[in-house]
Image (cartoon, rainbow, N blue to C red):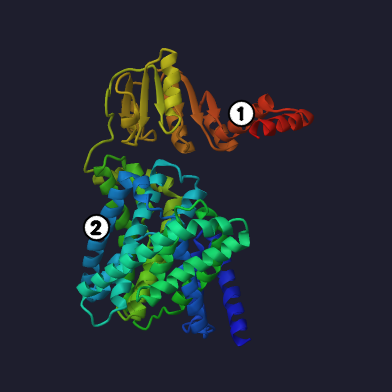
Amino acid sequence: MDIFIELSLIITITTLVAFIMKQLKQPLVVGYILSGLLLGPMFLNILHSTEVIEIFSKLGISILLFIVGLHMSPRVIKEVGSVSLVTGIGQVLFTSLVGFGIAIFLGLTTTAALYVSIALTFSSTIIILKLLSDKNEVHSLYGKIAVGLLLVQDVIATLILIVVSSIAGAEGTSVPFVLLTTLLKGGFIVIVITLLERLLLPKLLKSASDNSELLFIFSLTWGLGFAALFYALGLSVEIGALISGVVLSSSPYAEEISSRLRPLRDFFIVMFFVLLGSTMTFTAGTSILVPVIVLSLFVLVGNPIIVILIMNLLGYHKKTGFQTGLTVAQISEFSLILATLGFNIGHIDTQVLTIITLVGLITIAGSTYLILYSEAIYTHIEKYLRFLELRKNNQAATGKYAKVDSFIFGFNRVGDTFMDIFKEMGYSVGVVDFDPNTLDRLPKTGVKYYYGDAQDVEFLSELPLSTIKFVVSSIKDVETNATLVKHLRDHTNHPIIIVFAETPEDAQTLYDVGSSYVVLPHFIGAESTASFIRRVGYSKKSFTRKREQILKEWA
């Protein structure tokens, strides 16, 4: 009962801190780590049952990595695209090299500097997806690139965890021998997994899928069972859990399994972060203050700059690079897991673990606000970002002064539809976008392409807008559309302006600045669907007769 009461107090205090984090618009993980610090020996000294909490945290990490594996399909690199692959690998390389140099300069040992530099490279997929989802920008250009970049980071982090855990499990043995042994063990496991995946797994999943409780317990058995197998073979539990998820990633039940395990993950992973927070010590006093500040600034400022430079060289606009760069301005749970692993095997001491954890707290908190207010921040620092443009590509790509009758801003997935209708009506078409891949999707003749940002008034003033008759903007950002509409009303001969909006409030704002028509896709979609149901539907009685007729035809 003592342990029960202790756990109850831990959960209660953690919940109270989590409520405070919610009010501050912070990820709850920040609250969990702060709760551990509060519960540990530094303050309340409530947390004593460390063995129990360690078991819970181990379960949390295993389930977390199992779910991460479920979303790491072997086809993932192909799906994320070349820009995410190049940016992800480039960012990891440059961040780790620069971070290692900074850590050595700060007086850390070579091993500690290596752990710190690697920890600085990885960003939190979970936190970024949540923030992008809150902003409704998962499917924006920078959102898609960021998600792909983070998936590339997850793959690299997995490989690093495999190497570190293998070295940890073979003390006193040469590194080449350890890696060779790991490779042989890995080959054996791959053979076993392949046989199970082809011969046994489909039948088990199909049988378990009929019962939600059975699917849940089977998934848990699969993930923890592989984790235990890896441990028995001298590899890490974490890698076993992750690979067991990858095996199931191609299954049609992967998403359902993930959704059923998330509540269990959320509870146990809290214990991992609480335990991590409780291990933080400040015995070194102010000596860790300088490393924490310098490394945090490098992650908050240096990481975005690295991404901006890489994406600029790939041909992307500085705004896309800036918004993508902010998504890597924090370190992730992978970083904290790696640091904990290094601490447990004696590669780093408590002071280094505390430095990495504090950098995690500062960067996660800081990057959250940076991402939430990225638009406002960009308008204030845009002029300074021009110094990072090694490749000047913000001018019109083709036909800079060629006059056209209609413009499409933001080609996206609907640009083809507008382009076809304008051509059908006899209008010449100009397309404005800052995704360099858009040019490859346009017809080779008949369409003028202009590379730039619709929120950049200087760029808009260079466009041949004096004779246009139609403008369509499928851009979702209300501020960008407002800037565009104001410029068009001030510098053109009153064309018809059609823009898109997400909410009625945004639509009213765009009407106020002079839009001719504002499209609300959700409302139009609902009305079109209702109209479709009305056209193809039947009355209640006729529907029953029609259903019976269809069933007979199928039979």
Mark 2 and mark 1 lie on one chain; the one further toward the N terminus is 2
Of tags 2 and 1, the one toward the viewer is 1
Say what secondary structure mark 1 lies in.
helix
Residue 267 percent across, percent down from the top left:
55, 69
Q: Is residue 167 above or below residue 446?
A: below
Residue placed under numbered mark 1 in the picture: 528
Q: Residue furthest right?
A: 541
Q: Is residue 75 above or below residue 216?
A: above
For label 1, the crowd category at 10 Å Cα-Cα, with few meaning under 14, some 14 to 19 and many 20 or more, is: few
Q: Secondary structure at mark 2?
A: helix
Query: Gap between marks 2 and 1, in whole Å?
Result: 50 Å
Instruction: In this rendered view, identify the residue nearer to me: 483 or 108.
Output: 108
Which quarter of the rendered picture does the N terminus lie within?
A: bottom right
Q: Residue 334, how many percent across, how many down? A: 39, 65
Tell me if residue 527 can be seen.
yes
Please state, as top left, top right, bottom left or bottom right, where the C terminus lies in the image: top right
**Number of residue marks:** 2
Look at the numbered discs 2 and 1 and tell me whether their residues touch, using CB distance below 8 Å: no
Q: Residue at x 59, y 30 (%)?
A: 524
Which label belongs to residue 454?
A: none
Callout 1, which amino acid? Ser
Residue at position x 25%, y 46% from top? 388
User: Disc number at residue 94?
Assistant: 2
Crowd tier of the residue under label 2, counting other residues whose Cα lies within 10 Å: few below 14, some 14–19, many 20 or above: some
Please give the name of the residue rendered at 43% of the width and 67% of the height, measured from the top-left corner: 241
Judge by depth and name the residue closer to the eye, 262 or 553: 553
Report x, y in % for residue 212: 62, 59
At horizontal 31% and vertical 40% (from top left) the residue drawn is 317
Q: What amino acid is labelled 2 in the image?
A: Phe
Residue 20 visible somewhere in the drawing? no
Q: Position of residue 170 (x, y in %)?
A: 28, 79
Q: Quadrant of residue 469?
A: top left
